[in-house]
Image (cartoon, helix red, strand yellow):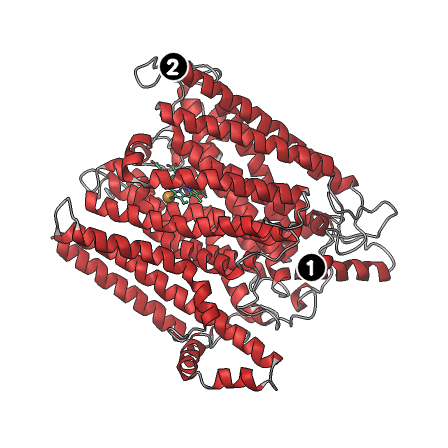
Amino acid sequence: MELFGFEKETLLDLTVNVIPLGIILFFIAAFAVVSPFGLDPVFSGLQFSLMISMFLLLAVLTYYAGRAVEDAERAEEEHATLDDPDGATELADDDESTEDDAELGSDDEGLPEA
Amino acid sequence: MAVGDLLLTGLMAVLLVGIIAALTRIENWRSYTPLAGGGTATGEDGAVLNREKPAGIIRWLTTVDHKDIGLLYGLYAIIAFAVGGIMATLIRVQLVVPGGAILGANAYNSILTSHGITMLFLFGTPIIAAFANYFIPLLIGADDMAFPRINAIAFWLLPPAALLIWAGFFLAPVTENMIEPAQTAWTMYTPLSAEQTNPGVDLMLLGLHLSGVAATMGAINFIATIFTERGDDVNWANLDIFSWTILTQSALILFAFPLLGSALVMLLMDRNLATTFFAVEGGGPLLWQHLFWFFGHPEVYILVLPPMGLVSLILPKFAGRKLFGFKFVVYSTLAIGVLSFGVWAHHMFSTGMDPRLRASFMAVSLAIAIPSAVKTFNWITTMWNGRLRLTSPMLFCIGFVSNFIIGGVTGVFLAAIPVDLVLHDTYYVVGHFHYIVMGAIAFAVFAGIYYWFPVFTGRMYQRTLGKAHFWLSMIGTNITFFAMLALGYLGMPRRYATYEFDGAIAPLAQVSTYHLLATTGAFILLVGQLIFIWNLLQSWLEGPKIEDGDPWNLERDGMLDKEWEWYDRKLETAITDGGEDETESALTDGGVPEGDASRSDDN
Ligand code: HEM
Ligand SMILES: [Cu+2]
């Protein structure tokens, strides 16, 4: 199973942050449906932008952290199993992640060990 | 008009994010930081540090060695802990009788204010920096911090900060109370803090500002170190948990403390230059609360994340099992880091802010409880079926988990608006956060001190005293702060110097009983901490010397981390050198093994 280019293991690890994301999403939906205090362009705007921005920030950070960890793990495996064909194919057929690799790589330019 | 403001703010945010994005594109940051490039991960000391250190006090005044600076931070924080602890004792003595036992209202307010600020800014942040300075470079296989001199500067800003914060206490007697200690409470709410004419408040604000600058410099250093100075074999997948929490904490500091600094400057200008940032006709008093808590809530996580990292690092060592769900702990740490910036107004639920806005802060506050709870389950699961060794550090870790559960659950209650409207500004809040700051943060600090005592002293502490310290702290904490939770339910308001309100606010008889209990607990705590200080000092000077690099027998479980390997190497070189190096002070010297060295499983 691949989602956002993550392996199953990583996805499982990332579920921990899916729960708070889900809670925020629940409240966004709930407040959209039920608004006992009425709607107001400024305050309802602030209300939703607080929740939505938190949702987005957490999602983005979780994505990049997962990427960084998974890429580091792959690099480790690559070292350990250079002659293992399975490991190699797994790395090779994952084009989506090579794109991401490039993206992350540009962020990490100044960091030799990253 | 408000919509226009909102739009402008939004544009401003986009602009700032754009600038940050542009800055990350600059490639040659490292060319500006020659110190960052020093050496490889193989040597113990970087090129800068290979020179002999000068002897005596000069060594400590001029050192840029991360271990020395770590010890300085530690010493500083322990002194602040003692000062803050004495203040806490005075507060509790005052409150044994409803009329107040020893202090007038002004003195009480001064001491209450200084207690909070001292414990949070002069003990909490520095003691974490102590561990981080000493152990992050060792744990990640770096030679030193990325910027050793900035590291030293960051520390040396702290003593003047403390003097400024406490200035009123020194100056009141000599200026005939012209300059008094600040009486603003640690939150410095306007209009009180803007209108008190006492110059002691200005000095305190400046001191706080200085400590914020110090914390920010330290944070930049840690981020740079963890990103750029890792050893070849350390990557994002195997970075230890303490470094992860310090990295997240540093990011929080980077975003939170400059904001505190700006708010403090605005307050200083309101006080001295007749600006109206927080005046009713200007920004209004609520502006202060928003700015303060936008810093203040991240600050509580700045204080709690690294202790969580310490526990995640130490607890598995004495459970004989690897940390359960290591990655869960990592990702949930990051989640706490982000979400802590979206909950600040849960401190302001009762201010009459817009109910829609309030509801969204409740939503995010409930969401942030999850990552904290996840960690708790990870710690418990790590111990499940483990081979527990109830050493002093382990006892403190278990105490941490226990107290953190109570602190966290009471926090979730407070995050619910209807509950908070009842309990806000009562002792319940005081109980909630003390379960965390004393019951959890201080406990993790104790665990860290005992666990690494051999590394930074070369000796072993006295285990009986360590256990006495634990039990007195555990019992004292739970008596004192549980009584406070009960006081809150009774309706006892916080920050009162006296409580002779017989029935008008709360039932006096019960309130007095619980105050008495809280004071009793505080004295138990005090005895425990005296034992701790005694143990620390005596064992440092006379404790049995450590002879091998694995006093906790971690190798058996394959859990000997890098800092112990480093320590072992250090011991071995000391032995082959044929003896102590007298110019190295005994403080960092592992020394020569003696017959009675303690190597035991259950210190
Ligand atoms: C589980 C997550 C937590 C939640 C949901 C939570 C919630 C709250 C809420 C709603 C309040 C405001 C109560 C009021 O004034 O009426 C509060 C106060 C406070 N909390 Fe927490 N809290 C949590 C964790 C923590 C942690 C980890 C710390 C410390 C490191 C902490 C420290 C504090 C402090 C210092 C205050 C009081 C500030 C003051 O008014 O002086 N909390 N908490
Ligand atoms: Cu908070």
Task: Answer with mark 2 or mark 1, whichever residue precedes in sequence.
Answer: 2
Q: Residue at x 28, y 57 (%)?
A: A25
* Disc 2, SS: helix
Q: Are marks 2 and 1 on the same chain?
A: yes
Where does label 1 land, which residue? B560
What amino acid is labelled 2 in the image? Leu
Quadrant location of the C terminus of chain B? top right
* Circle 2/circle 1 CB separation < 8 Å: no
* Disc 1, SS: loop
Where does residue B527 sit, x and y in percent of width and height? 63, 27
Viewer-nearest residue: B136 or B477 = B477
Q: Is the CB–ligand 1 distance for label 1 below 8 Å?
A: no
Q: Residues within 10 Å of mark 1 (few under 14, many from 20)?
A: some
Q: Give the Cα separation between the discs numbered 2 and 1.
A: 55 Å
What amino acid is labelled 1 in the image? Leu
Viewer-nearest residue: B440 or B583 = B440
Q: Residues within 10 Å of mark 2 (few under 14, many from 20)?
A: some
Q: Quadrant of residue B201?
A: top left
Q: Which mark is residue B508?
A: 2
Visible residue check, residue B31: no
Q: Chain of mark 2?
A: B
Q: Quadrant of residue B38?
A: bottom right
Q: Quadrant of ligand 2?
A: top left
